[in-house]
Image (cartoon, rainbow, N blue to C red):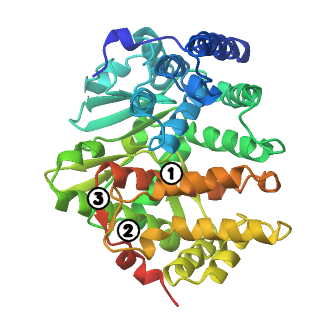
């Protein structure tokens, strides 16, 4: 449970939020200058990236984004998830706080919000409603409550002003990223930024998340490996999401569980990913580990948070199936056609570049054709992908952004890979994909 010291009012308005980011950038820049001079005095020639990613700078970024919440914090979460296996351990630990440890809103603000949503006397509907949340994240905070009829609910309350700050947050972060000079020249971010804003607006629409929760529950209702909360419509609205409270421990705590348990959990999550994409075309794309818990009593996986759920077309799902099938059967011509259909390459790219990207896609699918069960922690796949991906990133002719659907899907799969590495799981990916291998 969070302490009162972890509360903070949320800055509102584009100028005030940009001011927070601007002052943060100034402090980080000042720290880079100081540490750079220190290294030069020692006779070293430091790289700007090394100076940027110091523990002190990471702490500044984590603390500031945790206070701002909203889209600004989401960017920090993405860095944490996407680069968690690449950054030094101390930086990963600092950024990991952004996954679930935002500052909660002051109690007076919470009471005012609940009164506006539920009317005067709303407290009489609950036997217990602790004002301190059990979790606080980028868009809202969660309270564990007991209703008058003894139902245990998880109540997610959205921070005030978050919806109104999304567009400006994305624009502000984009401005700072461009100022950093870290992006390849010619890279057009506009389509991705537009989609990022749309995705964040969807995540801030709790009524939409409630519908996705029910839709997702309907398609996996006969799958005994998973547990999902049930939507409570009485207390739900556009900015409050109420659902049954489901017991479970954070999935990351299984790191010390028996190997058999870790292997089983990751096998079920990988199987679910294939079903999401190939059977349902309904994918929960947020890779945050906090979206998974484990119920030790039933030995089932608890699925949480459906704000980032996306619907995929049959055509796109089939293209990804063909990509994986081509890799499984070592047919690079099939991979090449699939990534062309997905939009990961263009026909006007040089032949050598198209082949390099095809090879990278083949390597990324290694768990489908490598030694089985695949030892995620024992593999150097992520480091190889990083090296080859960075090399491709230097190709000026490849400065383009794939579709948002592709990016979100890759982030979801990347998050599963990171979780499998963390749990040191060994998964028979070939058997899991076998039902979809039609060759």
Q: Secondary structure at mark 1?
A: helix
Q: Residue at x 82, y 71 (%)?
A: 347
- With respect to residue 321, does 410 lie above or below? above
Identify the mark nearer the N-term, 1 or 2: 1
Mark closer to the observer (1, 2): 2
Q: Secondary structure at mark 2?
A: helix
Q: Which mark is residue 211?
A: 1
Label 1 neighbour load within 10 Å: few <14, some 14-19, many 20+: some
Label 3 neighbour load within 10 Å: few <14, some 14-19, many 20+: many
Q: Residue at x 46, y 29 (%)?
A: 95
Q: Which mark is residue 271?
A: 2
Q: Which mark is residue 425?
A: 3
Does the CB distance between marks 1 and 2 fall below 8 Å? Answer: no
Q: In the rendered image, is residue 244 in sight? A: yes
Give how far apart the Cα atoms at labels 3 and 2 are.
14 Å
Spot occupied by residue 67 in the image (x, y as percentages of width and height): 51, 17
Spot occupied by residue 276 in the image (x, y as percentages of width and height): 47, 65
Identify the mark nearer the N-term, 3 or 1: 1
Q: In the rendered image, is residue 237 in sight? A: no
Residue in the foreground of this view, choosing between 367 and 124? 367
Identify the mark nearer the N-term, 3 or 2: 2
In the image, 318: left or right of 94?
right
Give how far apart the Cα atoms at labels 1 and 2 are.
23 Å
Spot occupied by residue 169 in the image (x, y as percentages of width and height): 67, 26
Q: Secondary structure at mark 3?
A: loop
Label 2 neighbour load within 10 Å: few <14, some 14-19, many 20+: some
């Amino acid at each position: 449970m969070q302490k009162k010291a972890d509360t903070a009012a949320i800055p509102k308005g584009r100028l005030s939020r940009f001011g927070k980011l601007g002052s943060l950038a100034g402090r980080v820049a000042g720290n880079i200058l100081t540490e750079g001079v220190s290294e030069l005095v020692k006779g070293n020639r430091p790289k700007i990236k090394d100076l940027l990613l110091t523990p002190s700078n990471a702490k500044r970024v984590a603390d500031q984004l945790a206070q701002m919440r909203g889209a600004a914090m989401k960017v920090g979460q993405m860095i944490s998830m996407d680069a968690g296996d690449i950054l030094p351990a101390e930086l990963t630990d600092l950024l990991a706080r952004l996954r679930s440890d935002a500052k909660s809103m002051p109690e007076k603000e919470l009471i005012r919000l609940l009164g506006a949503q539920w009317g005067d006397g709303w407290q009489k509907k609950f036997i217990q409603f602790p004002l301190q949340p059990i979790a606080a994240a980028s868009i809202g905070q969660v309270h564990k409550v007991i209703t008058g009829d003894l139902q245990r609910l998880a109540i997610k309350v959205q921070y005030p002003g978050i919806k109104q700050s999304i567009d400006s947050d994305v624009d502000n972060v984009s401005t700072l990223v461009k100022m950093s000079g870290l992006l390849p020249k010619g890279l057009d971010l506009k389509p991705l930024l537009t989609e990022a804003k749309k995705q964040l607006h969807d995540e801030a629409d709790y009524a939409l998340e409630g519908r996705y929760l029910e839709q997702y529950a309907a398609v996996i209702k006969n799958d005994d490996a998973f547990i999902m909360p049930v939507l409570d419509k009485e207390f739900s609205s556009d900015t409050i999401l109420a659902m049954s409270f489901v017991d479970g421990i954070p999935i990351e705590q299984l790191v010390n569980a028996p190997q058999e348990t870790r292997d089983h959990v990751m096998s079920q999550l990988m199987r679910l990913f294939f079903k999401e994409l190939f059977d349902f075309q309904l994918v929960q794309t947020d890779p945050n580990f906090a979206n998974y818990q484990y119920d030790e009593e039933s030995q089932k996986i608890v699925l949480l948070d459906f704000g980032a759920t996306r619907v995929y077309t049959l055509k796109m799902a089939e293209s990804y199936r063909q990509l994986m099938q081509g890799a499984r059967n070592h047919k690079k011509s099939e991979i090449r056609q699939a990534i062309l259909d997905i939009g990961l390459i263009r026909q006007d790219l040089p032949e050598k570049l198209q082949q390099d990207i095809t090879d990278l896609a083949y390597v990324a699918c290694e768990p489908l054709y490598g030694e089985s069960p695949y030892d995620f922690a024992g593999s150097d796949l992520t480091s190889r992908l990083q090296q080859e991906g960075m090399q491709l990133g230097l190709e000026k002719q490849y400065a383009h952004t794939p579709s948002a659907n592709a990016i979100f899907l890759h982030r979801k799969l990347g998050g599963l890979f990171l979780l499998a590495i963390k749990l040191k799981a060994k998964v028979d990916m070939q058997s899991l994909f076998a039902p979809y291998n039609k060759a």
